[in-house]
Amino acid sequence: MPSFQLNGQTVPFEQGDTIMRAAWRAGIEIPHYCWHPGLSIAANCRMCLVHVKSGRQMQMPIMRFDEKKGAYVPDTKPKLVPACQIEAQADMEVDSVGEEASKAQHAVQEFLLLNHPVDCPICDQAGECKLQDYWLEHQGDLKRKRTEPVHKPKGVRFGPTIVYDAERCIMCTRCIRVCDEVVGDPVLDMRERGNRNEIILAPGRELDHDYTLMTEHVCPVGALTSRDFRFKARVWFLKSVEGVCTGCATGCNTHVDYDSRYGKVYRLRPRDNMAVNKFWMCDDGMMTYTEAHEARVITATIGRGEDPEAVLPEEAIDDVALRLEQTEGAKIAFVFSALHSSEDNFALAKLAEAVGAEKKYLAARADWKGDDILRHTDHNPNRAGALAAAGGALEDLEDLLQDVMAGEVSAVVALGPTCAETAEQLAPLAKLETFITLSANEGVLTDVASIVVPVASWAESFGTFVNAKGMAQTFQRAIPAPAGVEPAWKTIAKIAEAIDSPLGFERVADVRTALGKSAPAPTSAPTSAAPAPAE
């Protein structure tokens, strides 16, 4: 592979790579605002100017102040070029940290801050703002401008999810290019020139497509802010783990941002994976973080109606074990979940095997609106993983209803909160004396259950999802589960132990090892593979 020299370091590149892209691949940051690896080249911020020292040198005439003469005299300086636009060439010698490049970065940074409001204490982007970062790295001095800055509209509602502050905008045009190039909906544009520039909506439109939070995410300076995350947390208090989106079968890779002080997830951000989601996520996917806290099941209950009996998790497990022992295995139905991890589903399969049950079904959310960008029509993150963990094809909930009405099923053990049916459609299940649901969230299955056992959500456990491409992608625990609540696979293992059929699962690594031996191994996503953590 050909290579070039960047600041004395050898950087390999592929045919057609620009200096910026090659440096990005090598993990070297050249300061930039407008460039993004998933968007077209705009080359308008000029922050990435570099000095190409090899080849024919071009010079620019300038006036330089001569200290001895006390006056400006004619001189020349090397012509710098934007690293985002210039193709890399073999044996090219590039400097992005030398005197000339540093002066240019300082000047560009000062220019961008001339009219920029210094409202960092109240700006949501504070702590992850490129203007702040580059000011420390490449400027570090006060504004020389003493006149009133240009004032522009503030707090403009762009749509249901986004607020725009034109005074903070540096006109990098990333948001415009996301709408045009990624979404195919040119709802944003730019008007005026120079320091009067601002981003505007197309006449009669709102920013309301399925990737509005992505247009906010790519903004490097806080001009676009999410109405959901706005003023909720300071990013320097947030920690992050690797996650996988639970919104659909695409399995977009995520950064799960949480505050360990409160055990709360605040947002999801896309995590780069060229084989799955590239650099993007849809709005619904980025909002799935709310599942970790809303409509949670945190207390075990026995009984139906408006006032079921609250019990300790250990009592619920003992009651579940007793009912399983008192029921003929052939009449116990096990309902797997396309929303739960492969580990949870595999533990359920082993429990079904332990009690001699052969009737197996799958609970899954109904299909939703897909697209040609990221959204898969399958509204479930782990249908493929659940099927593999269960050992093959599963019947649906309609089949379960028919089996219950036919008297072939007298007890049900279900994983997860929901399925395509409504509670009214599941009325036959509400008549069963033994309908056990292990779930992290409320849903139609918990509504009809006679015993509800709380389990950890995806944000509170380690696990694996298999996406529509057959890629197994692991996710990590972000926050602790509520007191007494454990991952579903561990809760199932305790039930098995209570009926004297231990599964031998002490850690998630034990489940994964057993799962790998019994189920077909899916393809692992290249950036998501991780060693099994201890629990």
Image (cartoon, rainbow, N blue to C red):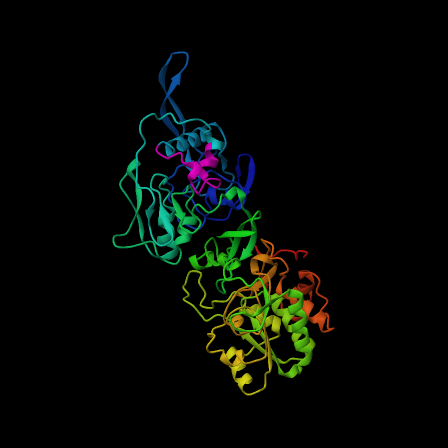
Q: Quadrant of the C terminus?
A: bottom right
Q: Residue 403: image x %, image y %? A: 55, 84
131 inside magenta stretch:
yes
Number of numbered markers: 0
Which of the two residues, 126 or 401, is positioned nearer the viewer here? 401
157 lies left or right of 344? left
475 vs 109: above or below: below
184 lies left or right of 339? left
User: From this viewpoint, which residue is outermost toward the bottom?
Assistant: 406
> Which residue corresponds to the image point at 45% horizontal and 65% vertical from the top-left?
376
Q: Residue 461: image x %, image y %? A: 61, 58
Dividing the picture into quadrants, the one containing residue 499 is bottom right
User: From this viewpoint, which residue is outermost toward the left?
Assistant: 203
Q: Which residues are magenta?
A: 115-135
434 vs 377: above or below: below
406 inside magenta stretch:
no
Q: Is residue 477 visible?
A: yes
Which of the two residues, 342 or 429, is positioned nearer the viewer here? 429
Dividing the picture into quadrants, the one containing residue 519 is bottom right
Dividing the picture into quadrants, the one containing residue 464 is bottom right
Q: Residue 489: image x %, image y %? A: 64, 66
Which of the two residues, 85 or 367, is positioned nearer the viewer here? 367
Q: Residue 528: image x %, image y %? A: 57, 56
517 lies left or right of 105? right
